[in-house]
Image: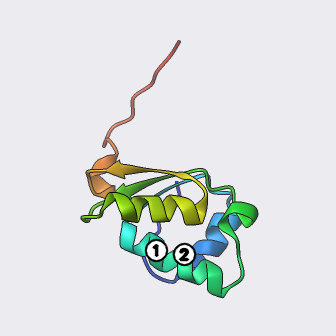
Amino acid sequence: MIPAGAGNSKRQIQLMRDFETTAIHIIPSYALLLASVFTETDVDPRRDTKLRIAFIGAEPHSEKMRRKIEEFYGFSAFNSYRSWPSSFPTSRAVWTN
């Protein structure tokens, strides 16, 4: 996990590339803003990143908006009904098979 909030979008994209990020938790409006920065910097998230899945939420959004995000990034986007800090437990759990 790389904790980074919205903003400094070019740096966000570089972090995704440097750390080969595969999943993101992002607010939908920022996902769309970030899409414009990908385009502006000529970085194709499908080709130039390892992104494969997104959890979007923490603000209202439509199904159309979710599909637009999926189409641009080429990944599956799932609704997350909780904000980032409350999405993760405060203690660790260990699972074994």
Query: Looking at the image, which residue sits at the far right?
Result: 47
Q: Position of residue 70 (x, y in %)?
A: 52, 58
Q: Picture coordinates of residue 30 (x, y %)?
A: 42, 74
Q: Can see residue 3?
A: no
Please, what secondary structure does the residue beneath circle 2 have? helix
> Disc 2, disc 1: CB below 8 Å?
yes
Left or right of residue 71: residue 60: left
Give the side of residue 17 with respect to residue 25, left or right. right
Which element carries disc 1, helix, strand or loop?
A: helix
The foreground one among 50 and 62 is 62
Crowding at mark 1 (Cα within 10 Å: few <14, some 14-19, many 20+): some
Q: Nearer the viewer, residue 85 or 66?
A: 66
Q: How are the residues colored?
A: rainbow
Q: CA distance from mark 2 to mark 1?
A: 5 Å
Q: Position of residue 68 (x, y in %)?
A: 47, 65
> Label 2: how many residues lie within 10 Å, few (<14), some (14-19) or many (20+)?
some
- The numbered dot on residue 45 is none
Could you tell whether 1 is left or right of 14 in the image? left
* Disc 1 residue type (three-letter): Leu
Residue at 63 percent of width and 69 percent of height: 15
State the residue at coordinates (50%, 16%): 96
The residue to which callout 1 is attached is 32
Q: Quadrant of residue 29?
A: bottom left
Amino acid type, label 2: Ala
Which residue was labeled with disc 2? 35
Horizontal side, residue 37 vs residue 27: left or right: right
**Residue 12 seen in this snapshot:** yes
Q: Residue furthest top?
A: 97
